[in-house]
Structure formats: structure tokens, C-alpha cells
Amino acid sequence: MLSSRLNWHAPENHLSQLLAAKRNAGEGILDLTESNPTGAGFAYPDLHAVFGDVDLVAYDPDPRGLAAAREAIAADYARRRVAVAADRILLTASSSESYAHLFKVLCDPGDGVLVPVPSYPLFDHLAGLEGIRLVPYRLEYHDRWHLDLDDLARCLDDRIRAVLVVSPNNPTGSVLRRDDLDRLARLCADRQLALIGDEVFADYPVDAASPAAVSVIEQHTALAISLGGLSKSAGLPQLKLGWMAVGGPDDVVRAALERLELVADTYLSVASPVQRATPELLQLAPRIREQISARLTANLSTLRQVAASYPACEVLPVEGGWSAVLRVPATRTDEHWALALAEQARVIVYPGFFFDFERDGYLVVSLLVTPVDFARGIARLFETIDRG
């Protein structure tokens, strides 16, 4: 009598069990997977003052989001050198909800969306809840991560409705190149596919020389949807505000926005106070981003310096985002390495299989961790791996 959309009874994995046991025993653990900026020691501006000036009683819902909020987000895109009109922006309660709306509008049950691997595993659950298929296309690593468009094209079938790109990617830190965007847009236009760009980490480039596309809505060939939100761009995940900006041919954009507005009107999930506070929150966001960017730069430098003393390990190139990928000896599975690090070094890392790396030999760490803990944890990590 219950839905079969998801495997609701997935057992807890060995790593989660071990970590729970150690925490219950009061053992000190260095968590190198921390991805919550509000718990990472940053100095936040006084948000009470922001919301103290917000009318907490007024309720005048707009399915696309309050105009002032959308205008502020359009101005924020302009800061990134992307032109988008406020009437082509729609607010959601999170990037996850943006995906849910898009999957409803673009796909019928059983239709498919191309998604990159390695990438964040959240997509599996979102697709399962909407009754659609995810079809993976591989990011290949040769000195840097590459989008193989020929391989992507081979993954297409008659029921694929959209292609998802994540730039910067979580966890590879790779970005979508401008020439790849142009070719991908032509492919999507020819096959009548939507191009979804998850750009939540776009404000955190690490390699300024990388020829990255700024946004999927730079091009006007294919229907494209850019996803962003306060969670990453302002380091404010607790305020639950995401957005979609839609670009492409006018007639297709108009049809997509009409359908997205109907879905959004059905839920009206975005709280009015955060919408009213959005213009001021986006004005404060640079103060938070600057701290996060400095942290990412410092921790990546520490990681590379420590790794240089351990030739059996390699820090793969990072072009943007909050994560770094370590290539380690494949003498154990990634899960066994993660378990050994938790047991022997009291350090938590992500095993590569969590992100669908196709082979063993990869671990993932967050660059958001406080510098002291990051340095201690990385030293323990490499020492443990060096001992084998």
C-alpha cells in the first residue's frame, strides 16, 4: 500500500555505523566533510537587524516570487556579468525544490535526465520522488576533468528530456568551458532538450585562469535554466531560498515559465519574510563570500603543501567550489580507506563511491573546515595512508 518510488529501507552503511559509535563514545573526531557554512566559524553580519525591518505579517503571494526579490537576484546575476530580466526568475525554497519543479515540468514519469558522474548523490532521490530516470554521463580525468560531449550524445535516447551540468561540480571542482557550453547548447536545441545548469558554487572560482562559462543562460540557442540560492552564494542555508533563471528562445522560455509558475503556485513554499529580506541579504552576501573564499584558498594551499610530502597521493586540480578530490593508492577500496581513517586517525572523509567515482582510489574532503582542524585532519589523513 506504500509507494515504491524510493528504497525506503536502505541500511545504514558501515562508515555511518562506525562514526555513530565513536561519537556516542565521546571520541574526538575531525570532520573533513563539513559543508555547513554556519557551523564553520565565519563572522556573520547581524541578521536580526535585517529581519527586524521586515514586515513579518504581510502576505501578498506571487507564484514567481516577490518582484523586489527577483529584481535583486537579477542584479546579482548582472554582478556575475549575466543579463537576465526579473520576469524570467522564479523563487523556490531550495535548489532541491528547483529540481523538483523542473522535473515535473520537463518530464513525464519514466522520462530521463542526463546527469554527470562523479557528482552529488542527491539527484537520485529527487529523480526517484518524481518517477523519472537518471542517465549518467561520465566526466573524464586527463590532467583535468573533461566533459566528453561525444560520450554524452551516445547516452541520449528518445525519452531524455534534459541535460544537467554542475559548474563548479561537486565534488570534482571542474567547470563548464565556454566552448563546451556552445556545443552543448546546439545539441540540446537540435534534440529539443532543456539544459539545466546547477551554478550554486559559481561565486567560488579557485582557478581564475580557467576559461569557464559564466552561466548556461549566456547562450540563447536552447532552453536553459540556471539554479542558484542563498545557501552557497551568501552562506545562508538556513534561510531556505533558491532560484531559477530561465534563458533561451523567447517562445520556449515563455512556455516553460508558464508551467513553472503553475507548479510554484500550487505550493507557494517560499516564506514571505526571506523574500522581503532578499535585497538586503544579497547586499550583505559579499562579506560572507569573502571569508569563505579566503578559507577555501588557505585550506587548498595547506592540502597541496602537505600532500607534496606524500608522493603516493595526489590532489587533483580544483577550478571552483568547496571540495577537493584526493587520489590515493587503490590498495584498499575507498570505503576501507574511509573506515581506516575514521578508526585509526579519527578523521572523517567521503569515500569516492559516495559520488559515483567509477573506480577505487578517490577520497573527497571539504575545504570549508576551520583551518586549524583542516591542517590537523589532513596531516592525520596522509600519515595514515602512508602507513598503508
Image (spheres, grey):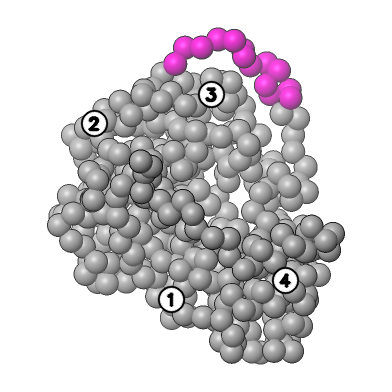
- Judging by the rendered image, the residue that carries numbered circle 1 is 358
Mark 2: secondary structure: helix
Instruction: Please identify the residue farthest to the top as the structure is shown.
Output: 58
Specify start and end residues of the magenta stretch as a single range.
48-61
User: Type of residue at label 4?
Assistant: Ala
Q: Nearer the viewer's eye, disc 4 or disc 1? A: 4
Q: Residue at x 74, y 50 (%)?
A: 40
Mark 1: secondary structure: loop
Q: CA distance from mark 4 to mark 2?
A: 51 Å
Q: CA distance from mark 4 to mark 1?
A: 23 Å
- Judging by the rendered image, the residue that carries numbered circle 3 is 271
Residue 357 visible within the image = yes
> Residue 87's spot in the image, x, y percent?
35, 27
Lower sequence index among marks 2 and 3: 2
Q: Which mark is residue 254?
A: 2
User: Type of residue at label 3?
Assistant: Ala
Q: CA distance from mark 1 to mark 3?
A: 40 Å
User: Type of residue at label 2?
Assistant: Arg
- Judging by the rendered image, the residue that carries numbered circle 4 is 342
Q: Nearer the viewer's eye, disc 2 or disc 3? A: 3
Horizontal side of 221 relative to 5 (left or right) equals left
The one nearer the camera, 378 or 17, is: 17
Q: Residues within 10 Å of mark 2 (few under 14, many from 20)?
A: some
Q: Residues within 10 Å of mark 4 (few under 14, many from 20)?
A: many
> Residue 30's spot in the image, x, y percent?
77, 64
